[in-house]
Image (tube, coloured by chain):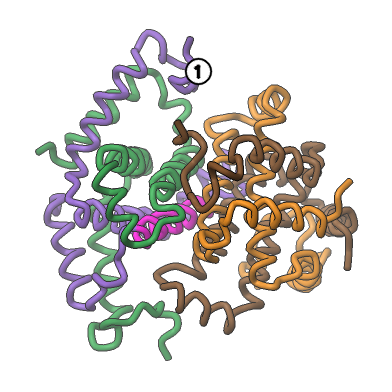
Chain colours: A brown, B orange, C green, D purple
């Protein structure tokens, strides 16, 4: 399996060969992440939980493609901003462990800002 | 640096300890990816290229946090659907290498569907 | 009740008094529509149909505010592009009446591109 | 020009004739607003201000269509929740007049939460 860094290298090589760095301003990459996230969400539009499950079975590759698109733009933005994405995720998990203590958060979808 | 699989394990442990799997239906995870992508994009709203660069310098941690949020929901959705995200990304890069041959795509932001 | 044109006049006067036209480039207005739509959607994140109904009862004003925000940026963008939004909506309804004939579309959530 | 209420009536008649009310749960309508907003934003992806202007000239109808789609789902959601959209917009403008006094806000894109 390719590592995160290997994937980022592949994305950079793909982009560089096409001279696309000039289009990849942070704002446009963030727009693209948002648009690809919408294309992913479109797969689940109008569907009940059961219909979602059936749809996933029939359209696994298309859904994987959309997830790959979101990830690709996200990994490139992180690369361009010099952000170590996995380190940022670990830091955010630690932050969330404080915001959402197990005993308070268990089984509840409330946002931490709604805790009193 | 934690590997992709280690990060996914951390996310699953965090979720499982809080009994949140029941909220994490594919449709709701896709909504969350979209909402976090919007929070990331909000950092660049109304800003010129120069203002974006200045904003990134001053708000690096907040921006990293939003990227981590998008990635966290995306990694969990991939985990739940049994999708190997890095393999999906590699497959998508290969697909894009065919859609966007270097000689046609170089320096152009056109979508492959607009090639004649 | 204020008419569409009266609302647009109010929005333009509000904007003009603050000298905000310079920020309201079409791309930034479209970003803002998308971000406000995400804030509206956030109200329904993680919630079942029943929980959505309960949430609407308790947060009607906040939800109305988010809908107003989407509409405000949309009305301003239409104004700026010289698009008559109501006429565009009527044209789109006519287009959809052809794409989705009653006998084919009744009770089905399929997209017209999936009709054979 | 059709009034807001006439447009809402057209949308309701279109929906009712196809028996689509059952799909139009608030959460799914909010998803749809978000997805259509993304399709609108896609028109401006990767483009500079000048390229946006050129694109608008060549694709006015497609852009109008996307704006009409956002508005259609928004008007239906407001209808379904019993929200008077124009009244909500007027109320929000008044709120924003307090949050953004002319003398503080003039020429500045700062959010009111960043005023000290």
Q: Please tell me whether the stretch drawn in magenta is mainly helix, strand or loop.
A: helix
Question: From what the image shows, is residue C55 above or below residue A52?
Answer: above
Q: In the displayed orientation, state which residue is furthest to the left.
A: C1
Question: From what the image shows, is residue A87 above or below residue B95?
Answer: above
Q: Is residue D98 left or right of residue A79?
A: left
Q: Residue D39: within the magenta?
A: yes
Name the residue located 57 percent from the left edge and 46 percent from the top edge.
B36
Q: Is mark 1 on a helix, strand or loop?
A: helix
Name the residue located 57 percent from the left edge and 64 percent from the top edge.
A40
Q: Which residue is the site of mark 1?
A: D114
Q: In the displayed orientation, state which residue is furthest to the front.
A: A103
Residue A18 in sight here:
no
Span of residues in magenta: D27-43
Residue B16, by quadrant, is bottom right
Q: How crowded is mark 1: few (under 14 residues within 10 Å), some or many (20 or more)?
A: few
Residue D11, by quadrant, is bottom left
Residue A13 percent location from the top left of the image: 88, 56
Of the 4 image quadrants, the one containing the C terminus of chain B is bottom right
Residue C51 percent location from the top left of the image: 34, 56
Q: What's the chain of the residue with tag 1?
A: D
Name the residue located 25 percent from the left edge and 67 percent from the top edge.
C93
Residue A47 in sight here:
yes
Q: In this view, does B21 lie to the left or right of C108?
A: right
């Amino acid at each position: 399996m390719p590592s995160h860094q290997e994937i980022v290298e592949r994305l950079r090589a793909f982009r560089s060969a096409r001279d696309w760095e000039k289009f990849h301003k942070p704002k446009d990459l963030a727009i693209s992440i948002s648009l690809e996230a919408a294309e992913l969400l479109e797969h689940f539009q109008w569907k009940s939980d059961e219909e979602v499950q059936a749809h996933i079975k029939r359209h696994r590759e298309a859904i994987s493609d959309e997830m790959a698109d979101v990830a690709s733009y996200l990994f490139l933005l992180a690369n361009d901003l010099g952000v170590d994405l996995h380190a940022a995720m670990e830091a955010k998990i630690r932050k969330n462990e404080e915001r959402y203590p197990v005993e308070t958060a268990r089984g509840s979808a409330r946002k931490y800002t709604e805790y009193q």
